[in-house]
Amino acid sequence: MGATYWWMLFGMALVTYIPRMIPLTFLDGKELPPIVSGILRNIPFAVLGALIFPAVLFVQEGNILFGVVGASVAFLIAFLGGGVMSVVLGTIGVLAVYSLFI
């Protein structure tokens, strides 16, 4: 590998290390206010939603309704208290049946 790749690798390592190092260094032993803790606790869910939502719209090219039906079924099963496996299997089952009719 050329020097450019090593510098790029070093830069990526630095960029991913700094956001992890700063809180550990400056917040060591300090307690965050409850509002900040609540916001930080919800960031993974917000990011997951932002990553999944575009994929829902483009799951089947030319048929946006396929993704909307799948997301609706998944939300409904999850809202009714289903676990992760029941959400996944239930959505797959409904979409398998739905795909027979489209």
Image (tube, rainbow, N blue to C red):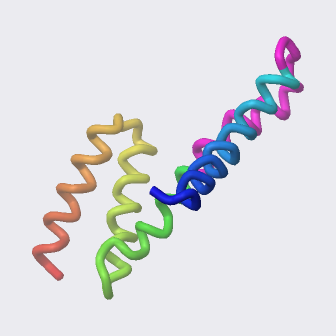
The answer to whether residue 43 is magenta is: yes
The answer to whether residue 44 is magenta is: yes
Is residue 63 positioned above or below 57 on the image?
A: below
Q: Position of residue 6 (x, y in %)?
A: 56, 52
Q: Which quarter of the figure is the C terminus placed in?
A: bottom left
Q: Which quarter of the figure is the N terminus placed in?
A: bottom left
Q: Which residue is drawn at the image coordinates 62% and 50% (left, top)?
A: 12
Q: Which residue is drawn at the image coordinates 10% and 74% (left, top)?
A: 100
Q: Position of residue 90 (x, y in %)?
A: 24, 49
Q: Which residue is drawn at the image coordinates 62% and 43% (left, top)?
A: 13
Q: Which residue is drawn at the image coordinates 40% and 36% (left, top)?
A: 81
Q: Is residue 53 left or right of residue 30?
A: left
Question: Which span of residues is magenta-colored?
Answer: 28-47
Is residue 94 positioned above or below 12 on the image?
A: below
Q: Is residue 102 left or right of residue 43?
A: left
| Residue 95, image quadrant | bottom left
